[in-house]
Amino acid sequence: MSVMILGRKELESVLKMDEVIEGVKSVYQLKARGDTVVWPLVSHEFTDKTAVMDIRSGGVFGSEQIHGLKMLNNFPFNKDQGLPPFNGMLMVFDSETGIPLGVMDAAYITCMRTGAAGAIGAQALARKDSQSVLLLGAGKQAEFQIAAILTAIPGIKRIFIGDLLDPMHGQSFAKECPLRLKRHFDITKDNCCFEAVSDLETAARESDIIITITPSRQPIIQKEWIRPGTHLSCIGADMEGKEEIDPQIFVKARIFADDIEQCIRVGELERPIRENIISKEAISGEIGQVLCGKKQGRLCDEDITIFDATGLALLDLVTGKRAIAQAKKLGLGLNAEI
Amino acid sequence: MSVMILGRKELESVLKMDEVIEGVKSVYQLKARGDTVVWPLVSHEFTDKTAVMDIRSGGVFGSEQIHGLKMLNNFPFNKDQGLPPFNGMLMVFDSETGIPLGVMDAAYITCMRTGAAGAIGAQALARKDSQSVLLLGAGKQAEFQIAAILTAIPGIKRIFIGDLLDPMHGQSFAKECPLRLKRHFDITKDNCCFEAVSDLETAARESDIIITITPSRQPIIQKEWIRPGTHLSCIGADMEGKEEIDPQIFVKARIFADDIEQCIRVGELERPIRENIISKEAISGEIGQVLCGKKQGRLCDEDITIFDATGLALLDLVTGKRAIAQAKKLGLGLNAEI
């Protein structure tokens, strides 16, 4: 039995953002059709440490026919010893035979599919004439969000980048953006400018799309900053207590989730629902229903739309499947006899 | 980050039965000291198929410091297409850093550690002067049980092999035993004879140790066949409904389990407890407590002792750790940059 082993280097070579976006869309649509399953989360806190691990698993059936799992370890103290704090592995199996297809580093795939998720929300829900984006957060996920939105919405001409924690870093990141996009994603966008901003309010007022990708635990984007017609993809909040936008923004917005129950539990929707700022019924649906044509996304140009994405291991599995197929085609990766 | 990838071929080269036995003992002892954790089982039945998958995970801390998981897929219909029905992968992580150590085929490791478990039970509980063994079952696990018992108890001189389902296979298996032991385990035992038996009763009456390793769902070994002083390692029963020995044997026996709760749920202990043939209090303890010296195993030469082993993913993890260390030493396996 030959199993494909892919490290970060191979994944960087084989994963193309447009294919990752197609894969993530496929999962969202299959989920809306009832062709996916998410198995119970297994997690553990290591004693005497702040370290945690979790195992997320599930299956994507229908046209994909894969199942598997992702094990992630977060050991913050590793940094003190010069070791990476996040370590994870993904295993993908064929659901028609149970035979293992591949094993790979989970960190890079997580970045790619998270970028794809933010962009898919914007592509499905933002105004068709959208040209400007405010990206809140310039951490390691930021370039993936930018690569994805430029792939999904080629008409984007301005990207504002706000990094409240480290404005200097935001500036250097904005400057490096064209080079990073070229080098890491083979994307050249001469007609798009990248601007670091410290005045988030002005940037938000000038943006058609806002993407939030920070570890914030209090609202940063305020309700007053949001003009009619804006779309927000809220990506950073993926565990209890995390939030990036004023919960009042939800009140008049048209709201979609990647997974409604999970978003209510750990997403940007956690606080507005818990504090009864909106009811669960105010959530219009899941993004997959929009992509399937089962629900209408934006109803008019004045709608404020929100996509709350908390992440699904199913996205990793399908992205992993794409990586394996591409690696086979290009003769990359290790073929291990198992 | 370099991760060791081991296929079946490498595992056959690097895993030595004596080291596997030491590893499994280490887990049992750490379990008795509270230094292990078993995380919730995740399982799934695929629709329109008889296929099932499960994910077993946990951690072995103390002197071992590893955690991880084993994913097993059982797709019986694969046989019709000439594909293996069982496929599984094991992932081992360092519990002090969360960094992946290795990924490997799970099938061979499962056989090795299951052999070790049966032998450890016998070594800890059988009479010290034991010389004869009845092995019930001559399937793919049988040679591992034999290799392990000969490693753990060098004084064994006669091994009776009973295969009720396929007596002809039992005969050829017994004949091939010396060659298999030499070839697969580098074990030479000129002073031990291997005899296929069809008369189980006589063989049982002549045996100091009985090891059961069949998929049976009804008792095969009868109470009347068991003379005082016999030890039984019950290995085959590992899911609801499976059983191999007359539940009445438990009545006067000194009983140990690998994990009491799991054995009551799915092991040989399932029926005697469910049918109130014995009470839970009749179970003397877990094998790790005997190995630690916290509980006394056999009290006298006349005791009938039983070890009920249902298998723990922790055994695979520790065996995997041993395999990785040995592969590094011998320069075997694939080192994948992850």
Image (tube, coloured by chain):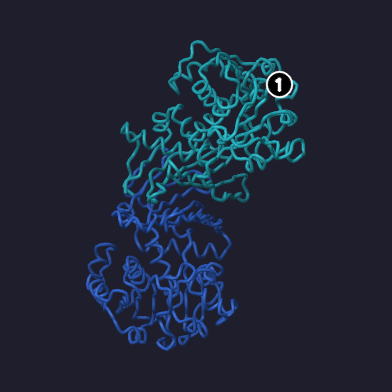
Chain colours: A cyan, B blue
- Pointer 1 indicates a residue of which chain? A
- Residue at 50%, 52% (x, y): give it: B66
* Horizontal side of residue A171 vs B28, given as left or right: right
Q: Is residue A181 visible?
A: yes
Instruction: Point out the residue furthest to the right here.
Output: A276
In this rendered view, identify the residue nearer to me: B10 or A70.
A70
Kind of residue at disc 1: Ile
Q: Position of residue A316 (x, y in %)?
A: 49, 39
Q: Is residue B3 above or below residue A115?
A: below
Examine the image and state in which quarter residue B279 appears. bottom right
- Residue at 55%, 16% (x, y): give it: A156
Q: Residues within 10 Å of mark 1 (few under 14, many from 20)?
A: many
Instruction: Point out the residue furthest to the top here.
Output: A191
- Name the residue that disc number 1 marks: A226
Q: Is residue B182 above or below residue A257?
A: below
- Residue at 31%, 51% (x, y): give it: B10
* Horizontal side of residue A109 vs A161, given as left or right: left
Examine the image and state in which quarter residue B162 appears. bottom left
Q: Position of residue A185 (x, y in %)?
A: 45, 23
* Horizontal side of residue A215 vs B124, given as left or right: right
Q: Position of residue A151 (x, y in %)?
A: 49, 22
Which quarter of the figure is the C terminus of chain B placed in?
Answer: top left
Q: Is residue A83 visible?
A: no
